[in-house]
Image: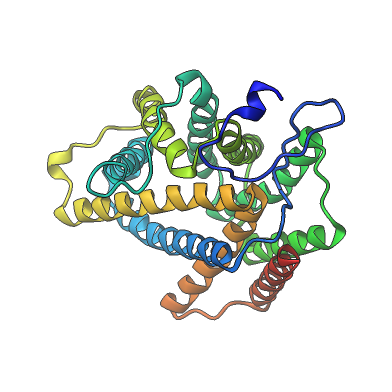
Amino acid sequence: MSAMEKKEPLTQVYSVPPSPTGLPQWNPDRTTSPPSIKEKIATALCIALNTFATVAMVFLSKKIFSDPQMHDAQVLFTIWHFACTAAVLWLASRAPFRAFKPVRLPVRKILPICVLFTAYVILGNMSLSYNTIGFYQLAKVMTTPVVVLITFVMFKTPISMSKALAILCICLGVSLTNSSSAQSNPLGAIIAVGAVVITGFYQILIGKKIEDLEVTAQQLLLNQAPLSAFLLIFFVPVLDTVPDFRTIPTNIYWSLLGSGVMACLLNLSQFLIISRTSALTFNVVGNLKTILILSGGWYLEGKLPTQTEAAGVLLALGGGWLYSHLKRK
């Protein structure tokens, strides 16, 4: 028995079958023994928490970016979110809470995922700057098939025809709800493609690092958050206009405080969902959240969706139901 086999992991996230070459074979869309009722409930709660935090973050961000100075400080905004995440996790790991046992990971082990996160944030902000919101949302939808393609090419992980059909329905449904406002240009399209590819690699690497480093989602995020925030600092002079904080209204500061709490819940639930399921499942949930946010926006604005948008909502929800049904089998 090798030294690796003797080592007792901190948390057994899922089993990894050996490949024919004898090397560990990672399965991003793992299919282990059926989870217990308790695990299903915990996963459902993580998804519900992620959905709540996402919706709250959208409306808080809309409020914050209504201030012209904060609109031009989006990298600083992200740094604030990761600083809040790191602070909350650090407190949660200490007495009297002791929600999890903190571990210190070597910088070289987590640097790749931090670099991918930095690139993901920068390209995402550039995509939003060079494209319309509709095209930006359409590009984000393509993260799901990109994750499927990456896992197939790099890890030889197939996907059943039924799941592929469900994912296609979700992507097509979300696309129909955004197609009317989707406009771009060659440079914007290139940036959007780069953002989607980097996002796919980032999400997949979250699950792989949790397994390779034998840590929990909380332990990995506690190490990643401060390093990612530090790396983003170097891009502030290039991409941001530092605001005059003395002139920012008090209500914007309260919104920033609320967004910091939501960011912690959002980041942690993302890591938990990926560690419990897969990057692919997380993307399916993300697409369904887009439908939820759009529907909520229509309701608040007193607007009725067009026939195309209504068909897109039904198609996305049907695909989501089919995918969740297939995952339970």
Residue 204 or residue 24, whichever sits in front = 24
Q: How many marks?
A: 0
Q: Position of residue 19 (x, y in %)?
A: 82, 32
Q: Residue furthest front?
A: 1
Expressed as whole percent of the image width and height from the top left, the position of residue 72 reads: 34, 39
Query: How was the colour assigned to the protein in this rendering?
Result: rainbow
* The quadrant where residue 169 appears: bottom right
Residue that extends furthest to the left in the rendered view of this protein: 246
- Say whether residue 287 is left or right of residue 2: left
Locate residue 11 relative to residue 55 in the image: left or right. right
Q: Residue at x 48, y 40 (%)?
A: 125
Identify which residue is drawn at 12% across, 40% down: 246
Quadrant where the N terminus lies? top right
The percent coordinates of residue 299 (x first, y second) are: 46, 78
Is residue 109 positioned above or below 159 on the image?
above
Q: Position of residue 132 (x, y in %)?
A: 55, 50
Q: Quadrant of the C terminus?
A: bottom right
Residue 140 in sight here: yes
Up/down of 133 relative to 151, above or below? below
**Occupied quadrant, residue 286:** bottom right
Residue 66 can be seen, yes or no: no
Q: Nearer the viewer, residue 196 or 309?
A: 196
